[in-house]
Image: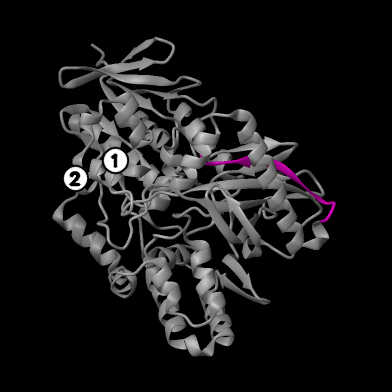
Amino acid sequence: MAIKMKKVVIIGGGVSGLTAGIYLQKAGMQTEIYEKHTVAGGLCTGWKREGFFIDNCVHWLTGSREGSALNQLWKEVGVLGEDILLYEKEKFFSAELNGDKITFWRDKERTRKELLALSPEDAEEINQLMDAVKMAESMTVPVEKPFDMMSPIGYVKMGISMADMGKVMKLYGKMDIKELAARFHHPLIRMAITDYMPPGYQAYAFVVSYATVTGGNGDIPRGGSLEMAMRMVKRYQKLGGMICTGKEVQKVLIKGQRAEGILLADGKTIKADYVVCATDTRHTFTRLIDGSYMPGGLSKIYKERESYPVVSAFHVAFGIEGSLDEAKETNVFACRPITIGMSRTERMSINNYSYEPDFAPKGKSIIQSTFVQTEEDYEYWIKLYQDQEAYHKKKAELSEEIQRRLVDKYPQLQGRVHILDVWTPATYNRYCNAWNGAYMGFIVTRNAKNRTVPGKIKGLPNVMIASQWLMGPGGLPVAASMGKFAAQRIMKAEKMDF
């Protein structure tokens, strides 16, 4: 007599949902993914305009270095592999101010020399920072199993593997990004540090992010975000999984202390033995499940807005006739003041995608400009979105202003650059149910506790949570690990070996 496979319904076809589906299919379970958008991938996506490809997500992929557990995870879900080429980032970013320029190179010793040459009086702070970057290269994302399923030996091994991170935290764990910048005398070094990280981030986040690139653990899979997501879809479907796009879920159907399945927006009911909510957690606990089920730690984070803020962005993509070889990869520079949403700035960034020749038609190239947006900015955009005419008018006005500032900086672009597309915090909310337009999770500020929220729900043992919002600061590695953890929890409940 054949044993009936347990059925798992996964809500959300982003990186978390796809990862959960892949591992559960490998375990022999029957899974179905329901995604409201017409394409899977969630925030890990991109789209075409006029023959150009606009990449929304990957600036580097943590876990690209061989040998780590995260690297193995990416291989298991199809993101990386022997046939997947990687672009090795030459630098973290460059910043300019008052005629001076510094670059945080992949080669950290090259960076050290440039910084020391620029500002000898900052030698002590520069050397300390660069030494900390070297130590932070040992930082890994814990992806083997959830903390509550980890043995004491597992904790010890994890601690040993990241021993140097303890030293980094001792140096920078009690200051934020502004306080780190203020330790330097030279205005460009101060500006560069605050250029890259939004206000509120702890100082060690800058160190760890840069160390990801210097350690060769932050390269970019060729093809960009959408191809990365589609490889995961292909792996999932090859294992027998079913993905239904354009299918919005209205709610999880609950009877007593168990979920029975889901109700789609079109009125169709889908039965299931387990449900995985791989969506924005605010959406999960306001639309899919009653808010009374929200874990206390997560509820507290949502209430403490100053301690756990989130950020979004206003983006403009530009098509260029020819190339902009003067500014490769990521660059930040001064510009005439501009107000985006409620935020006024005199700094502008561009990302140059010339390393991906397939992102633009032959003889052309694509760049993007990104402006950080706060929760206050999100309120501005979501309110403006209610008046579509005003919303599109404002997007057009701002993108044209940004284009003028781009040409101010690079006069050689005059007559060679045009606007391809513009997207805002409201866009993230519309397509991905992203709370306050956030594309990553909560920022854990200096005065806040780094909380890890369990991926299970008290009172609903057959409902799991898989989301980047469960552990700060979110992002692709956290999203993938939480998808894996959801699969592990279900397998544990079914007394199966992972």
Looking at the picture, how far across and down is residue 267, in whole percent? 40, 9
The secondary structure type at the circle numbered 2 is helix
Q: In the image shown, does 386 or 463 lie closer to the viewer?
A: 386
**Which residue position is annotated with label 2?**
149
Question: Residue shown at 15%/21% (left/top)?
Answer: 257
Tell me, what colour scheme is on the image?
A: one colour
- Quarter of the rendering occupied by the C terminus: top left
Q: Which amino acid does label 2 sit on?
A: Met
Residue in front for this viewpoint, 474 or 133? 474
Question: Relative to 446, is 98 above or below?
Answer: below
Q: Where in the figure is residue 286, as x and y percent of width and height?
A: 32, 29
Q: Can residue 495 be seen in this view?
A: no
Q: What residue type is labelled 1?
A: Phe
Q: State the SS at label 1.
A: helix
User: Where does the image place residue 167, in percent across and percent down from the top left?
Assistant: 30, 74
Quadrant holding the N terminus = top left
Residue 448 vs residue 185: left or right?
A: left
User: Residue 5 lies in what quarter of the image?
Assistant: top left
Label annotation for residue 485: 1
Left or right, 405 with respect to 251, comes to: right
Residue 29 is tagged as none
Relative to 153, is 49 on the left or the right?
Answer: right
Whether residue 151 can be seen here? yes
Q: Are marks 2 and 1 in contact (CB under 8 Å)?
A: yes
In the rendered image of this protein, does residue 288 appear above or below residue 350?
A: above
Question: Does 421 lie within the magenta span?
Answer: yes
